[in-house]
Image (cartoon, grey):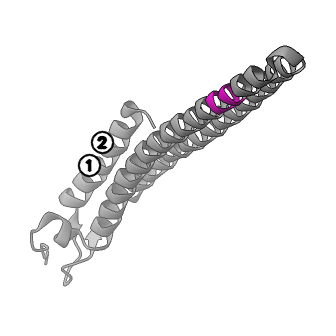
């Protein structure tokens, strides 16, 4: 969810809170309120339209992470294959067999080190993206819980006693 959508969700939750704050208490009750149901439904519908975009963004992050890891694995295999081929060419020459083996081992070690580093970096990148998505989803979920709680007990959300009308 981009900042615009997150802001829109926050605005919708504020609008719902305002509806509750401005609503009247039912006679002889303190925790029941009369609200404009159409306005609440409209806000809930808009929230439902915005939340799937956040979920899609999280799925896209996971998909990108999987793609990055896959590319890193392919690159690792290519580097290792190339190193082995290079090592085979060097080993095939009898006069430099010992040197070729040492170089091949160094190339393989370097290829493995680079591949490991690419995997580590890709994993770290994915973890950062997923953490950010998790934080965004968590914030939105907390806002929804607060709004839902306000609908159930508006007096607790505003801190004001309910008004009784006679």
Q: Give the CA separation, mark 1 to mark 2.
A: 5 Å
Q: Position of residue 158 (x, y in %)?
A: 15, 64
Q: Main secondary structure of the magenta part?
A: helix
Q: Which residue has dot 1 on it? A: 14
Residue drawn at 51 percent across, 49 percent down: 48
The local secondary structure at tag 2 comes to: helix
> In the figure, residue 151 lies in which quadrant?
bottom left
Residue drawn at 19 percent across, 59 percent down: 21
Proximity of marks 1 and 2: CB atoms separated by less than 8 Å: yes
Judging depth in this view, the residue of 149 and 127 nearest the camera is 127
For this view, does 12 lie left or right of residue 27? right
Circle 2 residues within 10 Å: few <14, some 14–19, many ≥20: few
Please say whether residue 34 is visible from this viewpoint: no
Q: Residue furthest front?
A: 95
Residue drawn at 76 percent across, 25 percent down: 98
In the picture, the disc for residue 136 is: none
Judging depth in this view, the residue of 132 and 42 nearest the camera is 132
What span is in magenta? 105-110
Q: Residue furthest bottom?
A: 28
Circle 1 residues within 10 Å: few <14, some 14–19, many ≥20: some
> In the figure, residue 99 lies in which quadrant?
top right
For this view, does 74 lie left or right of residue 109? right
Q: Position of residue 26 (x, y in %)?
A: 24, 75
Q: Residue furthest left?
A: 160
């Amino acid at each position: 969810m981009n900042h615009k959508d997150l802001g829109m969700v926050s605005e919708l939750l504020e609008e719902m809170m305002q509806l509750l704050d401005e609503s009247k208490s039912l006679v002889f009750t303190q925790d029941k309120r009369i609200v404009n149901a159409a306005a609440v439904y409209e806000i809930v519908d808009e929230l439902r339209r915005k939340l799937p975009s956040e979920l899609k963004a999280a799925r896209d992050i996971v998909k990108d992470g999987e793609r990055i890891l896959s590319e890193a694995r392919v690159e690792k295999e290519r580097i290792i294959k190339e190193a082995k081929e290079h090592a085979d060419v060097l080993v095939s020459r009898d006069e430099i067999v010992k040197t070729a083996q040492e170089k091949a081992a160094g190339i393989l070690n370097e290829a493995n080190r680079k591949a490991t580093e690419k995997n580590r970096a890709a994993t770290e990148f994915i973890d950062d993206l997923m953490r950010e998505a998790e934080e965004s989803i968590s914030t939105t979920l907390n806002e929804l819980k607060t709004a839902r709680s306000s609908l159930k007990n508006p007096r607790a959300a505003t801190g004001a006693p309910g008004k009784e009308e006679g």
